[in-house]
Image (cartoon, coloured by chain):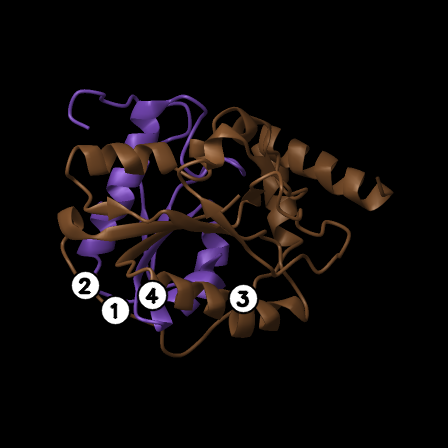
Amino acid sequence: MQFSRLKNQLLARLATRFPALAKKFTDSYTPRANSGDIPWVRPAVPLPQAKLALVTTAGIHHPEQQPFDMNDPNGDPSYRAVDGNRLFADFTITHDYYDHSDADKDPNIILPLDRMQEMVGEKKLGSLAATHYSFMGHIVGPHIDTLTHCTAVEVARKLLQDEVDIVLLTPG
Amino acid sequence: MGLIQRVIEEAGIATIGISIVREYAEQVRPPRTVFLKWPFGHPVGEPYNKAQQVTVVTESLRVLYEIETAGTIVDLPFAWRRHKYDTDDK
């Protein structure tokens, strides 16, 4: 493993354990600022009729899928489509920029699939999409354009094809 | 995460994002955000704390339907490891 990966993993662990250090960690990353209009649509249907999909930047995926590229300092703008019905039976998390040891134990803390399924059972939520989407956070430099013009657009199109009404997004 | 959220909303799907770094949401300006001052890797809470996780997702979806202004960030009032979660009404 490269030294830079070990360094990132150590920093991520420290930032999670000692919140005072997290500020330093977040200051080292600057997301792309946006001005002007903010996209806006109202939910198409009430919650008890809505179909929900989850999108996360926590780097979770099926073990047989290609891991996110942790050696590129600009991050990896690609995504993995995950099958919500079998993901938690066998999953892996590829992400060096946060400490995922707790998420490894209970992935609901980064992708609340079980909680969503329960809401469907209680008829508080209409339905849950079968496919959800996983990215890796910490994307900078030229990969931001790839994300906003290609991969995120592709995911949005797939969500529309799947007739998803609402999306809940979670970070790592 | 907020950049992806903006793209999905732009495509016509209503979105809500959970943020644990308020500054990111302030700069990226996604359509709707709930903010929790919680540690990295724990946007929905602690492992196996079902009442806590239920509270976070329930509040997030409530906010998704209640926010009327694009770019709103709602600060959820749950202090990390200090809030007591009611399991009966969730």
Q: CA distance from mark 3 to mark 2?
A: 24 Å
* Label 3 in the same subunit as label 4: yes
Q: Which residue is mark 1?
A: A41
Q: Which residue is mark 4?
A: A160
Report the Cα–Cα distance between label 3 and label 4: 14 Å
Mark 4 or 1: in front is 4
Residue at 75% across, 57% down? A73
The kind of secondary structure element at disc 4 is helix
Colour applied to chain B: purple
Amino acid carrying mark 3 in the image:
Thr
Q: Is residue A164 above or below residue A86?
A: below
Q: Looking at the picture, tell me which residue is in the foreground, B52 or B71.
A: B52
Q: CA distance from mark 1 to mark 3?
A: 21 Å
Q: Are marks 1 and 3 on the same chain?
A: yes
Residue type marked 4: Leu
Pointer 2 residue: A44
Q: Give the distance between the C-alpha atoms of the residues marked 4 and 1, in whole angstroms.
A: 14 Å
Q: Circle 3 sits on which residue?
A: A151
**Crowd rating for badge 4 (residues with CA inside 10 Å; few <14, some 14–19, many 20+):** some
B23 on left or right of A122 = right
Between disc 4 and disc 2, the foreground one is 4
Q: Secondary structure at mark 2?
A: loop
**Chain coloured brown: which letter?**
A
N-term mark: 3 or 4: 3
**Looking at the rendering, in which quadrant would you find the C terminus of chain B?**
top left
Q: Amino acid at mark 2?
A: Ala
Task: Please identify, in this view, whether the residue under mark 1 or under mark 2 is nearer the observer.
Answer: 2
Q: Quadrant of residue B52?
A: top left
Badge 1 amino acid: Val
